[in-house]
């Protein structure tokens, strides 16, 4: 290896290390995070479930890197659920594997569907839109009790 190659190699490594520390410093030291774009309605601040009557519920899901808020909800069998969905950061997917529910969670907007859960059991929610390093672990559950 000639002297110039060695110099360029060392210089490249130093620049990469400075770049890496700059990213870590921006993230931890300056507290810079991915910008949020939540709809202004109160239920989307954290995500929640509201009971309207014995068999009617409203579920407000907020998708974020890399989980759903709430991650698990429990409802009685026979419930009809108005399901509202948004994203805090990037585009996520929302697929209830045991049902024909396939929505996109898009920042700044709300997606909606109504689902009736007429059989007891665990209904698994997965994110089916690639959203980053934790995508494959982004899951949720709807537990339907007898
Ligand atoms: Cu969220 Cu993939």
Image (spheres, rainbow, N blue to C red):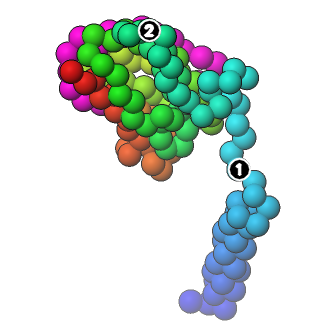
Q: Nearer the viewer, mark 2 or mark 1?
A: 2
Of the residues under marks 2 and 1, which one precedes in the sequence? 1
In the foreground, 59 or 77: 77
Q: Is residue 33 above or below residue 72?
A: below
Q: Residue at x 20, y 15 (%)?
A: 119
Q: Secondary structure at mark 1?
A: loop
Please name the predominant secondary structure of the magenta segment in the image: strand
Q: Is residue 125 visible?
A: no
Residue at the front extreme, as displayed: 54
The residue under label 2 is 53
Report whether 65 appears left or right of 137: right
Assign the C terminus to one quadrant of the image: top left
Q: Is mark 2 within 8 Å of ligand 1?
A: no
Per the model, the C-alpha gap separating discs 2 and 1 is 39 Å
Left or right: residue 118 compared with residue 131 = left
Residue situated furthest right in the rendering: 30
User: Bounds of the magenta span?
Assistant: 104-124
- Which is nearer the eye, 84 or 59? 59
Q: For numbered disc 2, what is the local secondary structure?
A: strand
* Residue tagged 1: 33
Residue 130 in the image, given as x and y percentages of width and height = 46, 37
Assess disc 1: are there few (<14), some (14-19) or many (≥20) residues with their C-alpha within 10 Å of its C-alpha: few
């Amino acid at each position: 290896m000639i002297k110039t190659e060695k110099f360029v190699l060392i210089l490249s490594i130093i620049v990469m290390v400075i770049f890496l520390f700059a990213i870590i410093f921006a993230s931890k030291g300056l507290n810079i995070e991915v910008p949020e774009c939540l709809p202004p309605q109160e239920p989307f601040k954290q995500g929640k479930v509201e009971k309207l009557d014995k068999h009617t519920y409203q579920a407000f899901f907020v998708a974020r890197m890399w989980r759903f808020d709430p991650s698990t909800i429990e409802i009685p069998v026979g419930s009809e659920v108005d399901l509202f969905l948004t994203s805090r950061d990037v585009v996520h997917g929302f697929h209830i594997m045991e049902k024909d529910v396939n929505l996109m969670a898009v920042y700044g907007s709300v997606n909606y569907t109504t689902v009736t859960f007429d059989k007891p059991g665990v209904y698994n929610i997965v994110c089916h839109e690639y959203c980053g390093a934790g995508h494959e672990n982004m899951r949720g559950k709807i537990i339907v009790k007898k």
